[in-house]
Image (tube, grey):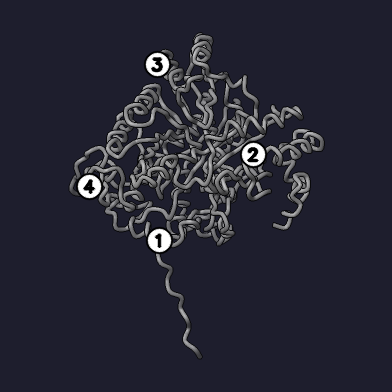
């Protein structure tokens, strides 16, 4: 009988080897930051992510500089970890100052309710991170193979349900930070203390195989797009005899994630699948159990397939549930029935329920800046300074100004108008719900534009919608410059995914409230021809759509072949 052939173990990725030898994410970061120059080594580049920064370069100038045999304009992006997007007035003002002192004069709201800064040169990296910490915020684990910024509803409703979500997000954000003191030593000059226990009991010495995202929601407020996360937490409440909301516990869903790689069929977007229910006091226990499952079973040989969604998809829900039982330490209850998820309107004026108000201010692509026509950044600074409001960042890249006294509403409206800030009521629903990632010129992964083409694309498609009186229907547009899905381009009504320069893959069929994935309709459409493709689709929706049927739902009902017939691309029906 022939000898059994044993396959050689797969080689770990280089990043895994680096993490293991980094001495708790230290590496030579401190030395490299002190050495001067304009860039860092590849090892430092990978370790910096854990500390909240990515090295980038200006891609607009790179080719011309190369032709002149000059160095690229290297710079750093720094991202703030702020669970639920919540800031105090003082914290926001501190971050606003940092934009001028260390960055390019803008703040950018991320689709994960954070704020990031661009244009920070190497010599300003350590001072900028220290300045963020002086506001009692951190950049630790805003990036890297760890639990990223915790998302939850940004609506500052003063009720038991929303307060619980905010408290849970803060609790988890603190509990899930690494034990290593490297961040504090490198960026805040903390002196090492002998005997300090830095054992990473949750993450292990190689941390997680890939980034790990958590979102929290209640069924009627899914503004955090919870199912797009590796781990989705949906809090379930019921009223008691007096009508007060009482927390029953949490439905837990696993395996969400929207990134993929073009031309690799074994990479794909996926929404999280409900797997179990836990009681009110068991949230941290189940979250840590899911993290340990990903830590031990995630792919450490291929970073393209290292997310939890591939563990779930490759092994199946039965295996995941049985394995999760072991990490949790008992048999988990199956998920409980719950209503459909819903995304509420957060922009404009809203009563918080405590005698105060919040105002949702739209921010195009999340970019808080001053332009010749709209001085949004100055306006927000003045409102925060004069009225002491507490800003909250939304997953829609907008900003909510919370805790406003009723008597200040008219003055705040007047101040914003003075600076040319367009109120939400002056925008169509389509414009309000359009997302775009930064893409060019800062993101090294971008294949084409996103933020810089958001306005013309919105205007073009909005013109078509107006033609059929559809501009105020709830329809979500997400634009990304590459297939990584940072603007959640695979879970809305319309996703435009960068394919090659100036061209996009068109995705349709998702739903507005975040419960259905979209599907690829067309592969490489030039930006100038997007209107040509969507025109007949919008016309068909207007004529054939059922009452209250969203655009994505309409596309799913018709199916890809029928849609391709409408756009004149029948030859692609078999693709």
Q: Which residue is mark 3?
A: 385
Q: CA distance from mark 1 to mark 2?
A: 40 Å
Q: CA distance from mark 4 to mark 2?
A: 48 Å
| Quadrant location of the C terminus in the rendered image | bottom right
User: Between tags 1 and 2, which lies in front?
Assistant: 2
Q: Which residue is mark 2?
A: 528
User: Is 117 positioned to the left or the right of 214 in the image?
Assistant: left
Asked whether the residues under the numbered discs 3 and 2 touch, taking CB atoms below 8 Å apart as contact, a structural biologist would say no
Q: Which circle marks residue 31 in the picture?
A: 4
Mark 2 Cα-neighbour bin, 10 Å: few <14, some 14–19, many ≥20: few
Q: CA distance from mark 3 to mark 1?
A: 48 Å
User: Is 192 positioned to the left or the right of 400 in the image?
Assistant: left
N-term-proximal mark, 3 vs 2? 3
Task: Give above or below for 173 relative to 264.
Answer: above
Q: Which circle marks residue 13 in the picture?
A: 1
Q: CA distance from mark 1 to mark 4?
A: 25 Å
Q: Quadrant of residue 115?
A: top left
> Looking at the picture, how far across and down is residue 384, in whole percent?
42, 18
> Looking at the picture, how far across and down is residue 142, in whole percent?
40, 41
> Looking at the picture, how far across and down is residue 366, in whole percent?
50, 31
User: Between tags 1 and 4, which lies in front?
Assistant: 4
Q: CA distance from mark 3 to mark 2?
A: 43 Å
**Secondary structure beneath label 4:** helix
**Secondary structure beneath label 1:** loop
């Amino acid at each position: 009988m022939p000898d059994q052939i044993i396959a050689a173990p797969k080689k770990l990725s280089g990043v895994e080897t680096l993490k293991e030898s980094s001495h708790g994410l230290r590496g030579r970061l401190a030395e490299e930051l002190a050495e001067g120059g304009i860039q860092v080594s590849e090892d430092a580049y990978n370790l910096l992510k854990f500390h909240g920064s990515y090295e980038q370069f200006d891609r607009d100038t790179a080719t011309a500089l190369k032709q002149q045999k000059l160095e690229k304009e290297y710079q750093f992006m720094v991202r703030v970890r702020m669970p639920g997007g919540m800031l105090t007035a003082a914290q926001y003002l501190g971050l606003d100052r940092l934009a001028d002192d260390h960055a390019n004069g803008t703040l950018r709201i991320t689709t994960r309710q954070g704020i990031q800064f661009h244009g920070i040169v190497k010599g300003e990296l350590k001072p900028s991170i220290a300045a963020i910490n002086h506001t009692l915020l951190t950049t630790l684990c805003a990036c890297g193979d760890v639990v990223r910024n915790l998302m939850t509803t940004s609506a500052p409703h003063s009720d038991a349900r929303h307060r619980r979500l905010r408290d849970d997000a803060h609790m988890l954000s603190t509990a899930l930070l690494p034990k290593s003191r490297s961040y504090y030593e490198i960026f805040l000059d903390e002196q090492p203390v002998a005997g300090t226990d830095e054992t990473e009991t949750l993450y292990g010495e190689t941390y997680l195989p890939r980034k790990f995202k958590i979102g929290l929601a209640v069924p009627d407020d899914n503004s955090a797009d919870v199912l797009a996360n590796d781990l989705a937490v949906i809090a379930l409440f019921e009223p008691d005899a007096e009508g007060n909301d009482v927390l029953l516990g949490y439905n837990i869903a696993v395996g969400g994630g929207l990134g993929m790689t073009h031309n690799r069929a074994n990479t794909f977007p996926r929404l999280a699948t409900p797997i179990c229910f836990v009681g009110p006091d068991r949230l941290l226990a189940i979250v840590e159990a899911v993290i340990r499952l990903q830590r031990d079973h995630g792919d450490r040989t291929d970073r393209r397939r290292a997310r939890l969604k591939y563990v779930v998809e490759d092994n199946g829900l039965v295996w995941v549930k049985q394995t999760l039982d072991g990490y949790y330490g008992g048999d988990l209850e199956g998920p409980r029935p719950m209503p459909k998820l819903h995304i509420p309107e957060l922009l404009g004026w809203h009563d918080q329920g405590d005698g105060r108000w919040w105002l949702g201010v739209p921010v195009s692509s999340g970019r808080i800046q001053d332009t010749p026509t709209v001085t949004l950044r100055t306006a927000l600074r003045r409102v925060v300074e004069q009225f002491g409001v507490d800003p909250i960042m939304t997953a829609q890249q907008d900003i909510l100004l919370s805790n406003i006294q009723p008597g200040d509403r008219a003055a705040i409206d007047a101040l914003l108008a003075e600076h040319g800030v367009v109120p939400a009521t002056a925008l169509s629903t389509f414009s309000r719900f359009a997302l775009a990632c930064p893409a060019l010129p800062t993101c090294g992964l971008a294949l084409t534009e996103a933020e810089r083409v958001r306005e013309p694309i919105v205007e073009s498609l909005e013109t078509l919608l107006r033609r059929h009186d559809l501009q105020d229907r709830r329809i979500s547009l997400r634009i990304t410059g590459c297939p990584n899905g940072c603007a959640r381009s695979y879970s809305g009504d319309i996703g435009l995914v960068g394919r090659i320069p100036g061209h996009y893959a068109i995705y349709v069929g998702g739903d507005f409230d975040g419960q259905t994935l979209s599907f690829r309709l067309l592969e490489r459409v030039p930006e100038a021809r997007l209107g040509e493709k969507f025109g007949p689709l919008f016309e068909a929706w207007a004529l054939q759509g059922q009452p209250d049927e969203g655009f994505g739902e309409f596309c799913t009902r018709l199916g890809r072949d029928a849609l391709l017939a409408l756009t004149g691309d029948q030859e692609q029906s078999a693709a």
